[in-house]
Image: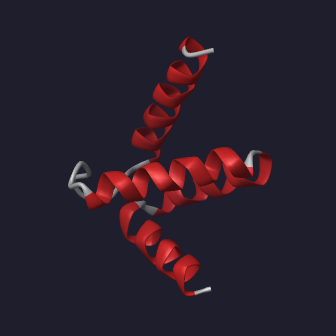
Amino acid sequence: SQAEEMRRTMLSQILNNEARERLARIAMVKPEKARAMEDLLIRMARSGQLRGQVTEKQLVELLENINQQSQSST
């Protein structure tokens, strides 16, 4: 669909190659987690919270923050 294509285009602009590969590996194991991460990255990009492309290291840090938040809320 057109929305999915726009989403992929945005993510390719937001993430560097290593980060994109990491997210793809996450999607194979936990598609819902990868989708939530994509949503978060797109929201952050739209609100101007991202400076330049997200690296794999930054992606991992974001994932760790999300994991900590979800563990503390349960």
Q: Is residue 22 above or below residue 20?
A: above
Residue 57 in the image, given as x and y percentages of width and height: 43, 39
Residue found farthest to the right: 29
Whether residue 22 is visible to the viewer of this picture, yes or no, is no
8 vs 26, left or right, is left
Residue 66 in the image, given as x and y percentages of width and height: 51, 30
Residue at point 46%, 66% (across, down): 11
Q: Split into 4 quadrants, where in the image is the C terminus?
A: top right
Residue 29 in the image, given as x and y percentages of width and height: 79, 46
Q: Is residue 3 above or below residue 62?
A: below
Foreground residue among 27 and 4: 4
Residue at point 54%, 12% (across, down): 72
Whether residue 48 is visible to the viewer of this picture, yes or no, is yes
Q: Is residue 26 above or below residue 74?
A: below
Residue 46 in the image, given as x and y percentages of width and height: 28, 61
Foreground residue among 32 and 11: 32
Scheme by which the image is coloured: secondary structure
Residue at point 37%, 70% (across, down): 13
Q: Split into 4 quadrants, where in the image is the N terminus?
A: bottom right
Foreground residue among 40 and 20: 40
Residue at point 52%, 74% (across, down): 8
Foreground residue among 14 and 33: 33
